[in-house]
């Protein structure tokens, strides 16, 4: 799993695409304050997509929105 990271001020959003057996790729986003440990992350499910590229693009869009709208 290769993490992708966006940061806005003190907030961090990690996003990735995880392969699911027989389902395609699950797009995932995790957001947190940069000073908090990873266990304090909030998980935002994005959905299942047929390709890794689509899942990553959707996850990145969702991560950007989470930072913009302060979804923590």
Image: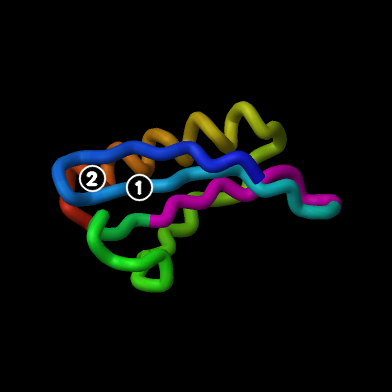
Is 43 situated above or below 7? below
Q: From which residue to which does the magenta span run?
A: 22-30
Q: Does the magenta stretch include residue 61?
A: no
Task: Tell me the quadrant of the picture where the C terminus can be found.
Answer: bottom left
User: Which quadrant would residue 16 be assigned to in this image?
Assistant: top right
The extreme bottom residue here reads 39
> Callout 1: helix, strand or loop?
strand
Residue corresponding to mark 2: 67
- Provide the major secondary structure of the magenta segment: strand
- Residue drawn at (42%, 59%) of the image: 44
Where does the image place residue 3, in percent across and percent down from the top left?
53, 42
Is 35 situated above or below 19? below
As measured in the structure, the alpha-carbon distance from the residue carrying label 1 to the one carrying label 2 is 7 Å
In this image, 14 relative to 19: left or right? Answer: left
- Residue drawn at (30%, 48%) of the image: 12
Tell me whether circle 1 and circle 2 mark residues in contact (CB < 8 Å): yes
Where does the image place residue 14, in percent across and percent down from the top left?
42, 47
Where does the image place residue 62, in percent across and percent down from the top left?
37, 42
Q: Does the magenta stretch include residue 23?
A: yes
User: Which quadrant would residue 38 be assigned to in this image?
Assistant: bottom left
Task: Tell me the quadrant of the picture where the N terminus can be found.
Answer: top right
Residue corresponding to mark 1: 13
- Give the mark, 1 or 2, whose residue is nearer the N terminus: 1
């Amino acid at each position: 799993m290769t993490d992708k990271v966006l940061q806005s001020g003190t907030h961090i959003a990690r996003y990735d695409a995880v392969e699911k057996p027989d389902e395609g790729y699950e797009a995932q986003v995790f957001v947190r304050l940069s000073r908090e440990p990873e266990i304090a992350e909030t998980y935002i499910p994005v959905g299942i997509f047929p390709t890794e590229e689509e899942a990553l693009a959707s996850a990145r869009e969702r991560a950007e929105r989470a930072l913009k709208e302060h979804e923590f």
